[in-house]
Amino acid sequence: MEGMNSDHPLLVATKVRKIYRTGSVAVTALDDLDLVVRHGELVAVMGPSGSGKTTLLNCLSGLDDIDGGRVEIDGHDLFAMPDAARTEHRARTMGFVFQSFNLIPVFSAVENVELPLLLVGTRPREARRRALATLERVGLAHRVEHRPSELSGGEQQRVTIARALVGRPAIVWADEPTGNLDSAMATQVMDLLCDLNRDEGQTIVLVTHDSAIGARVPRLIRMRDGRLVDDVRQAVADRAVERDVTLG
Ligand SMILES: Nc1ncnc2c1ncn2[C@@H]1O[C@H](COP(=O)(O)OP(=O)(O)OP(=O)(O)O)[C@@H](O)[C@H]1O
Ligand SMILES: [Mg+2]
């Protein structure tokens, strides 16, 4: 991303706390969590249901508020910004991919992908050009006029990946991006994310329940009860696992 300084970490989360209060019940979903993500990393987040993975993505991306701690993106304190500035910052620096594809059903693939550019004021011709190039990058050059209902699940998820990438974000957050796909399509989508990371240095943080995915990414973190309990860097090429930090 333009203006991003790659000398310091892209993301520094320090003692991040998130408490959900529902009636008389308080759930500590993030318990003083620390995490550093460097430019160009691909990080998978695993952990049991309810351990705080989605909360982690929502809080570190600034989609949701936090109750304590601090999140810096490229040196900028996310929660020190007024809401409007945070929203704008998110639109400029982050892309999102969710399990449910969240595509607009009446829009074609290319219209879905160009939308975020149009929303930040990119001129229509330029937005169209970049949307087409990004769809080509995800292998969908032959489906640009199709609507979501005319695409397979894997193709729909590739459209959402194109939509997440089209603004050239510093970081892509993906919450169970393969959760709704059969295993062949899941493999295709993961291959694409791994390629984007390896070939283009795209920083990606993704949540997954799939241990096969966990085994093939350069860095795997595990959560339990709102804490990081494991942080492993793995040699991806030969699958040799090297344990360099074990927390908790
Ligand atoms: N909006 C909310 N209001 C109240 N409690 C919530 C809310 N969202 C999440 N929680 C609670 O916070 C904890 C963490 O939830 P989170 O959704 O982050 O888990 P997760 O690791 O993503 O689980 P899963 O694998 O099932 O998606 C859970 O105990 C959950 O019940
Ligand atoms: Mg979740």
Image (cartoon, rainbow, N blue to C red):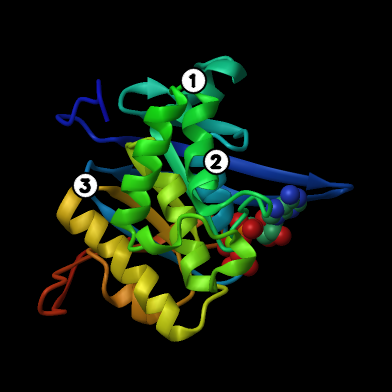
Please say if 235 is above or below 94: below
Q: Earlier in the sequence, mark 2 or mark 3?
A: 3
Q: Amino acid at mark 3?
A: Gly
Between disc 2 and disc 3, the foreground one is: 3
Mark 2 and mark 1 in contact? Answer it, CB < 8 Å: no
- Which residue is under mark 1? 121
* Rendered location of residue 100, percent (x, y): 62, 62
* Rendered location of residue 211, percent (x, y): 39, 80
Q: Residue furthest bottom?
A: 183
Residue 104 visible? The answer is yes
The answer to whether residue 209 is left or right of residue 188 is right
Residue 231 visible? The answer is no
Q: Residue at x 33, y 37 (%)?
A: 168
Q: Residue at x 17, y 58 (%)?
A: 198
CA separation, marks 2 and 3?
20 Å
Please say if 101 is above or below 37: below
41 or 113: nearer the eye? 113
- Which residue is under mark 2? 59
Mark 2 and mark 3 in contact? Answer it, CB < 8 Å: no
CA separation, marks 3 and 1?
27 Å
The total number of labels drawn is 3
Q: Amino acid at mark 1?
A: Gly
The local crowd at label 3, few if under 14, some if 14 to 19, many if 20 or more residues have their Cα within 10 Å, is: many
- Which residue is under mark 3? 40
100 or 244: nearer the eye? 100
The local crowd at label 1, few if under 14, some if 14 to 19, many if 20 or more residues have their Cα within 10 Å, is: few
CA separation, marks 2 and 1?
26 Å
219 or 137: nearer the eye? 137
Q: Amino acid at mark 2?
A: Cys
